[in-house]
């Protein structure tokens, strides 16, 4: 099974500043999907951004962008102009395109992001 | 918007009880999933279902079973609850598409305590 590693258990950022959350993964596959999910204290997991491995262009969703380095197997999330509402647990996830997994997600252990005023 | 509803936000049960966790989605999604979330461990896949009456084991199926009699409902069953099954349980659903890019949509989670 693919391993997803988030090396930062906790991160802190001041409002309006930029923060980068790191994620690396281990795979022998050439085609796959990568996701960042956000889980606020209210607990519902919501999708932040997704990246298709065959696309070289980094995905962007408003203040959220990724730095996808396929050769390095790295998939970091950059949050610009941080807001108090960005405080949450962030999970990096990998999905194989192989049908054996049922398209389930392999998650990292998460990074808890604190946003200070 | 997709709505994934888990029947209970909090549940307290006793050791040895048979426990049912229910999950319903309203978007006609074929794929459904049950994950367990523990601090420092992230989310781990218990079972998933491709479609009605289909089920496959995930990474940690021991002590659990599932039922998918209708497309919208995916139930997780703890046959004989034990204290090490105290955890947060998350249900998710997904519409499979050509190319596989559709994300999973999650419910609010059920925090289960086994005493």
Image (tube, coloured by chain):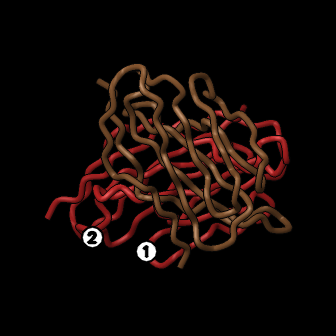
**Based on the displayed image, in which of its 4 quarters is residue B77 positioned?**
top right
Mark 2 Cα-neighbour bin, 10 Å: few <14, some 14–19, many ≥20: some
* Element under disc 1: loop
The N terminus of chain A lies in which quarter of the figure? top right
The C terminus of chain A lies in which quarter of the figure? bottom left
Q: Work out whether residue A19 or residue B17 is closer to the camera in this orientation and state it.
A: B17
Q: Work out whether residue B103 or residue B52 is closer to the camera in this orientation and state it.
A: B52
Marks 2 & 1, CB-CB < 8 Å contact: yes
Comes first in the chain, label 2 or label 1? 1
- Residue beneath the point at 67% across and 52% down: A69
- Residue beneath the point at 66% across and 44% down: B67
In screen coordinates, is B9 left or right of A38?
A: left
How far apart are labels 2 and 1 at the CA level? 10 Å
Q: Which residue is mark 1?
A: A63
Label the red chain with its letter. Answer: A
Label the brown chain with its letter. Answer: B
């Amino acid at each position: 099974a693919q391993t997803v590693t988030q090396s930062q258990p906790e991160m802190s950022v001041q409002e309006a500043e930029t923060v980068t959350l790191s994620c690396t993964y281990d795979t022998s596959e050439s085609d796959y999907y990568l996701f960042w999910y956000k889980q606020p204290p209210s607990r519902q997991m919501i999708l932040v951004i997704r990246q298709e491995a065959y696309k070289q262009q980094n995905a962007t969703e408003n203040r959220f962008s990724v730095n996808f380095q396929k050769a390095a197997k790295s998939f970091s999330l950059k949050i610009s102009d941080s807001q108090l509402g960005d405080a949450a647990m962030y999970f990096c996830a990998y999905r194989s395109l192989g049908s054996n997994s049922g398209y389930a997600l392999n998650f990292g252990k998460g990074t808890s992001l604190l946003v200070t005023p | 918007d997709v709505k994934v509803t888990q029947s209970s936000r909090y549940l307290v049960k006793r050791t040895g009880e048979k426990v049912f966790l229910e999950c319903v989605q309203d978007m006609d999604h074929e794929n459904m999933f049950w994950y367990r979330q523990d601090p420092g461990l992230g989310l781990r896949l218990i079972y998933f279902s491709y479609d009605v009456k289909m089920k496959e084991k995930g990474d940690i199926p021991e002590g659990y079973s599932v039922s998918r009699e209708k497309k919208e409902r995916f139930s997780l069953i703890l046959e004989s609850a034990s204290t090490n099954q105290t955890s947060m349980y998350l249900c998710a659903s997904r519409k499979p598409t050509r190319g596989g890019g559709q994300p999973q949509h999650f419910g609010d989670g059920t925090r289960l305590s086994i005493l």
